[in-house]
Image (spheres, rainbow, N blue to C red):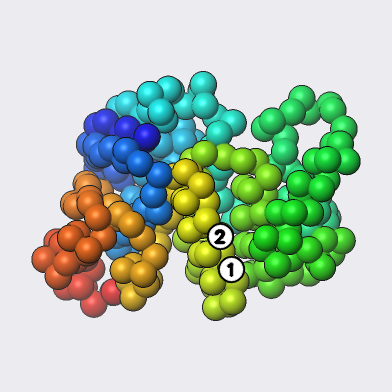
Amino acid sequence: MLTVQNLTVSYGGSRPAVEDVSFEIKKPALIGILGPNGAGKSTLIKGILKLVSSKGTVLFNQQPFSKIQREIAYVEQKSAIDDTFPITVRECVSLGLYPKMSWFKKISKAQWEQVDAALEKVNMLSYKNNQIGELSGGQFQRVLIARTLVQQAKFIFLDEPFVGIDATSEQVIMSLLRELRDEGKMVLIVHHDLSKVDNYFDEILMMDQHLIAKGPTKETFTKEQLAKTYGAALGLGVL
Ligand code: ADP
Ligand code: MG
């Protein structure tokens, strides 16, 4: 369960990027976070994950972030991990193990097997010894998903994971995310391709600085809510 109460994040401008957002997600689900450019979607995630300072309360299974940090995985927007950083695919995925172990411990054989199993799941095992800089955007995104798999996180946050990637990678990732949801994980995805929303998400949050709507996709992804969420953007012709 994820509880967000009165979350406000300001970067010091005249208005907060995210203002007074409250919602609760009770069951494992695939949740889409929707809203126009600049709506505060990335900021909402950063606020939830304490990556920016915020006001309000966030609880993961009734626990504060500090208690449950290891159970949380986050793949940021256009991953800021430098993909020219000289590590292999296998090493990159193994970074997901670190929240679970003391930093000075060596990775065991069993753990390397876990890494390989995760790579197999995203169809990237044959690239395990490649440098991450050699991968396409979609392949790299799959490797980042494999990293969250080895972390065995219960809460998974992905910020626009499908931007600039190939259709195959998108399908591989999406079917894996469905599996994770079925295993009881909570998966929150910032997403902007409105054509896929019905197909991808159990629930959606629609926002533009404030929370505009939240609920099961079928009932919530309506013309009326779209107009409320994207009204300003539509008026400006930027959608
Ligand atoms: P979205 O992800 O929905 O496109 P963001 O959360 O990135 O929106 O941004 C929300 C607002 O906060 C925007 O007006 C953006 O310019 C501003 N913003 C985002 N990050 C920063 C930052 N680090 N410093 C100052 N303003 C920021
Ligand atoms: Mg964003």
Q: Is residue 156 left or right of residue 35?
A: right
Could you tell me which residue is drawn at 83 percent across and 45 percent down? 112
140 sits to left or right of 168:
right
In this view, 151 is above or below 189: above
Q: Image height check: is 147 above or below 102?
A: below
Residue wearing tag 1: 172
Q: Which residue is mark 2?
A: 176
Question: Which secondary structure, mark 2?
Answer: helix
The image quadrant that residue 135 belongs to is bottom right
Residue at disc 2, CB closer than 8 Å to ligand 2: no
Indicate the position of residue 128 as horizontal and vertical percent values: 82, 61
| Residue at the image point whose x is 31% and y is 40% from the top | 25
- Mark 1 crowdedness (10 Å alpha carbons): few <14, some 14-19, many ≥20: some
Q: Residue at x 24, y 37 (%)?
A: 22
Q: Can residue 74 be seen by looking at this rendering?
A: yes
Determine contact: label 2, label 1, CB under 8 Å: yes
Question: Does residue 205 lie above or below 197 as drawn?
Answer: above
Q: Position of residue 79 (x, y in %)?
A: 59, 56
Q: Residues within 10 Å of mark 2 (few under 14, many from 20)?
A: some
